[in-house]
C-alpha cells in the first residue's frame, strides 16, 4: 500500500514564515482567535485523520468502486460510510463554515492545506465533503434566511451532503442552452424537471439526504445564460421538524464507468417534478453558482497538488530502496551488488521536478487562500476589493496549472517506479488515473485558460496583471539586502518581464484577431503559472535567509533547481505567444 505523511513542516513554513498568516488573521476580527498554536493543532489532527482514517481506504475504494442497487440507490465502497460518519463527528465537514449555522469559521488559508491532505490520501472520498462545502458556501452567500436555517446546520454537521448540478446531455460549458425547467407552485416552491449528467456524488449511502443545487430556467426566462436560475432540490423531502422524509422526484438513472476516482459515483440524475426552492434572485443563478464553482475550481486544483505530493513521497521512498546500477562517481553501497537509484542524475531530475512543482503549488494555494480570507473578512474595503481581484485573476491559474502539473508529477512518479509503476500493487497507476479527471471537470483547463486570457486579462486591458506585476516588483526591490536572493534576483526580473511582454502581445493580437485569445490562452496560462511560481520560490528562498538547517538547505537547492531547469520553459512559451494564431486557424476544417 502507498505511504503518505502530511508535509506539516512545509505547511507551517508557508503559513508562518512566508506569509505571516497569524499576523494577518489577528487583523481581521472574525479570524482573530485563530492563533499559530490553534492552526498547528488543526493541521496535526488533520494529518492524523487523513493518514489513519482515509489512506487505508483508498486502494480498496478504487478496486471496489461504487455499485448501483435497487434501480436507483448507490452503495459506496466498504468502509466509506463509517469513515464519513467519523469524519463528520470529528468536525471536518464544518471546518470553514459560517459559525452562525454551526460552522467553525476557520480561515480558507488553513482549509486549503487540509484539502491537500484529503486529496493526497483519498481523492474519491474527498469529493463528498468538498462538494458539500461548495454548496454551503453558495447557500450562505445567496440563499434566504429561511433556507440557511433549514439546510446549513445539517450540511455543516455532515448529516447531509451537497452537490452541484449544471451539465446536461446536450450542453457542457454552454449552459445557456440548458433544457431543465422550473415551474412555480402555489406554495412558493418550484417543480424541477430535466436531466443532469456528470453529477459527482449525485447518489450515495453516506448520508440520509443529499441537497442538490440545480440550474434551471423559469417559464419567463430570457434566452441564453442570462435566463438561468438556481434551485435547492433535496433528494428527500424535509419534514417540518427537520427530519428526512419521503423521496423527492429525483432518481439516479445510471452511474458512469470511469477511468479513475472509482470511489466517487458520477451520476445521471433525472428530475421529474422534484420540489425545490429558488436560491437568490430569478435569472441570477449563474453568478450564484459561480460562488460555488470558483471555490470548487481551487479545490480541484488541490486535487492535482495533493496527488502530486503523495506520488512524490512514494517515488522518493522507492528511489531510496530500489537497487539498480552504480553511481557515476563510484559505489555508494559497496556492500551490495548495486546502488539505490536515487544516486542517478535522471532519477534526481524527476524527483526534484516533482518536489519543485509541489512546493510551489503549496505556496500558491496558501496565497490564494489568504486572498480569499482578505476579500471576505478584511475591515478595509480597498483591501477587500484588491484581494477579490486577485482571487478572480488567479483562480483559473490555480485550477489549470495545479492539475496540469499534478498529472505531470503523477506520471513522473510512475516513471520512477519503472514497470512496478504500471501495476496496481504499488498504487502509482491509480494516482495517474485519479489525477486525469482534474484537468477536465469544473471547467476544462482550456476553458480556464480562456477565462484567464479573455475575462480576466483582455476585458480590463491587462490592468489586474499590471497591478500584480507592480506588487511582485515592489516586493523584489524590498529584498535588496537579502543575500540568499542573489542567484534568483535577475532570473525573476526576467520572468516578470516575460509575463508583461506576453500580456501586451496577447492584448495587441486580440485587438486585431478575435481568434487570438482562444488560440493563445493555454500558452499564456502556462507562462503565468511558471512566473507566479518563480515569484513564490523567491519568497520561500528569502524566508530561509540566514538559516543553515536541513530544511532551509533543501529549500534553497530546490528553488535553484526550479529557476535553472524549469523556469526557462517560460521563454519558449513567450515565443509561442509572439508567433500568434495564424497557423492555428489557417487549415480548413475539412483538411483535418
Image: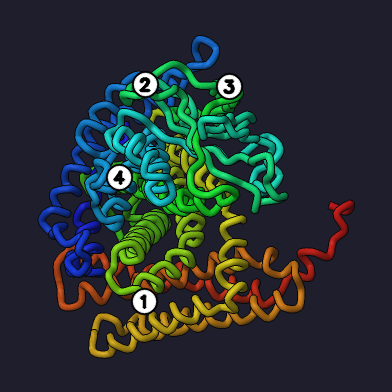
Between marks 4 and 1, how big is the CA–CA gap? 33 Å
Q: Real-space Cα distance between discs 3 and 1? A: 48 Å
| CB-based contact (under 8 Å), mark 1 and mark 2 | no
Along the polypeptide, which appears first: circle 2 or circle 4?
4
Give the colour scheme of this rendering.
rainbow
What residue sits 51% from the left and 60% below the top? 396
Crowd class of label 2 (few under 14; some 14 to 19; many from 20; radius 10 Å): some
Q: Are marks 3 and 4 in contact (CB under 8 Å)?
A: no
Residue 131, percent from left and from top: 42, 40
**Numbered badge on residue 382:** 1
Which residue carries the number 3 mark? 254
- Identity of the residue drawn at 61% across and 35% down: 182
Q: Earlier in the sequence, mark 2 or mark 3?
A: 2
Discs 3/4, front: 3
Q: Which percent across, then down, holds residue 458?
A: 62, 73
Q: Give neighbour class at mark 4: few <14, some 14-19, many 20+ (Cα, 10 Å).
A: many
Q: Is residue 246 left or right of residue 507?
A: left
Side (left or right) of 374 relative to 223: left
Q: Which residue is mark 4?
A: 117
* Number of residues whose C-alpha sits closer than 10 Å to that of mark 1, classed few (under 14), some (14–19) or many (20 or more): few
Q: Note whether residue 590 is visible.
A: yes
Q: Is residue 73 above or below residue 589?
A: above
Q: Is residue 416 left or right of residue 83?
A: right
- Which badge, 1 or 2, is on the more N-terminal residue? 2
User: Whole-Å distance between the Cαs marked 1 and 2?
Assistant: 44 Å
**Along the polypeptide, which appears first: circle 3 or circle 1?**
3
| Label 2, label 3: how far apart the Cα atoms are | 24 Å
Q: Residue 387 sits in which quadrant?
A: bottom left
Q: What is the CA distance from the residue labelled 2 to the residue labelled 4?
A: 32 Å
Amino acid at each position: 500500500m502507498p505511504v503518505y505523511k502530511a508535509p506539516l513542516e512545509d505547511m507551517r513554513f508557508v503559513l508562518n514564515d512566508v506569509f505571516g498568516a497569524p499576523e494577518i488573521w489577528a487583523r481581521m476580527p472574525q479570524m482573530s482567535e485563530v492563533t499559530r498554536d490553534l492552526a498547528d493543532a488543526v493541521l496535526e489532527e488533520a494529518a492524523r485523520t487523513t493518514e489513519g482514517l482515509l489512506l487505508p481506504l483508498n486502494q480498496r475504494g478504487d478496486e471496489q468502486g461504487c455499485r448501483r442497487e435497487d434501480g436507483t440507490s448507490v452503495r459506496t465502497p466498504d468502509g466509506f460510510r463509517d469513515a464519513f460518519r467519523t469524519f463528520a463527528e470529528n468536525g471536518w465537514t464544518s471546518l470553514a463554515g459560517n459559525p452562525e449555522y454551526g460552522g467553525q469559521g476557520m480561515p480558507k488559508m488553513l482549509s486549503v492545506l487540509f484539502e491537500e491532505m484529503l486529496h493526497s490520501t483519498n481523492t474519491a472520498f474527498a469529493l463528498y465533503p468538498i462538494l458539500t462545502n461548495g454548496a454551503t458556501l453558495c447557500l450562505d452567500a445567496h440563499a434566504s434566511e429561511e433556507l440557511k436555517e433549514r439546510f446549513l446546520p445539517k450540511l455543516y454537521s455532515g448529516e447531509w451532503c451537497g452537490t452541484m448540478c449544471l451539465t446536461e446531455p446536450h450542453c457542457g460549458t454552454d449552459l445557456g442552452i440548458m433544457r431543465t425547467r422550473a415551474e412555480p407552485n402555489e406554495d412558493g416552491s418550484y417543480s424541477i424537471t430535466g436531466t443532469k449528467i456528470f453529477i459527482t456524488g449525485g447518489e450515495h449511502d453516506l448520508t440520509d439526504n443529499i441537497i442538490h443545487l440545480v440550474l434551471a430556467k423559469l417559464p419567463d426566462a430570457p434566452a441564453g445564460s442570462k435566463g438561468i436560475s438556481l434551485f435547492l432540490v433535496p433528494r428527500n423531502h424535509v419534514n417540518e421538524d427537520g427530519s428526512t422524509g419521503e423521496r423527492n422526484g429525483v432518481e439516479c438513472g445510471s452511474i458512469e464507468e470511469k477511468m479513475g476516482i472509482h470511489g466517487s459515483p458520477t451520476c445521471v440524475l433525472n428530475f421529474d417534478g422534484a420540489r425545490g426552492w429558488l436560491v437568490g434572485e430569478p435569472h441570477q443563478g449563474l453568478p450564484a453558482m459561480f460562488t460555488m464553482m470558483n471555490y470548487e475550481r481551487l479545490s480541484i486544483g488541490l486535487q492535482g497538488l495533493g496527488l502530486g505530493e503523495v506520488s512524490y513521497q512514494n517515488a522518493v521512498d522507492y528511489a531510496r530502496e530500489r537497487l539498480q546500477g552504480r553511481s557515476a562517481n563510484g559505489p555508494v553501497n559497496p556492500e551490495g551488488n548495486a546502488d539505490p537509484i536515487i544516486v542517478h542524475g535522471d532519477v534526481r531530475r524527476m524527483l526534484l521536478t516533482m518536489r519543485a512543482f509541489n512546493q510551489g503549488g503549496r505556496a500558491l494555494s496558501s496565497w490564494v487562500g489568504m486572498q480569499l480570507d482578505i476579500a471576505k473578512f478584511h475591515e478595509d474595503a480597498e483591501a477587500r476589493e484588491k484581494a477579490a481581484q486577485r482571487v478572480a485573476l488567479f483562480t483559473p491559474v490555480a485550477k489549470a496549472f495545479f492539475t496540469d502539473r499534478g498529472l505531470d508529477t503523477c506520471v513522473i512518479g510512475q516513471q520512477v517506479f519503472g514497470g512496478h509503476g504500471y501495476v496496481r500493487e504499488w498504487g502509482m497507476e491509480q494516482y495517474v488515473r485519479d489525477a486525469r479527471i482534474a484537468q477536465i471537470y469544473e471547467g476544462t483547463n482550456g476553458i480556464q485558460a480562456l477565462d484567464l486570457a479573455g475575462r480576466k486579462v483582455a476585458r480590463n486591458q491587462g490592468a489586474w496583471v499590471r497591478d500584480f506585476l507592480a506588487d511582485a516588483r515592489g516586493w523584489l526591490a524590498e529584498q535588496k539586502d537579502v543575500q540568499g536572493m542573489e542567484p534568483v534576483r535577475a532570473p525573476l526580473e526576467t520572468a516578470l518581464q516575460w509575463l508583461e511582454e506576453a500580456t501586451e502581445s496577447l492584448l495587441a493580437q486580440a485587438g486585431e484577431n478575435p481568434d487570438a485569445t482562444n488560440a493563445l490562452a493555454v500558452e499564456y496560462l502556462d507562462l503565468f503559472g511558471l512566473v507566479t511560481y518563480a515569484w513564490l520560490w523567491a519568497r520561500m528562498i528569502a524566508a530561509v535567509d540566514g538559516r543553515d538547517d536541513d530544511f532551509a538547505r533543501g529549500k534553497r537547492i530546490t528553488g535553484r533547481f526550479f529557476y535553472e531547469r524549469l523556469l526557462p520553459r517560460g521563454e519558449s512559451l513567450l515565443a509561442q505567444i509572439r508567433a500568434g494564431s495564424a497557423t492555428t486557424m489557417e487549415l480548413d476544417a475539412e483538411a483535418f
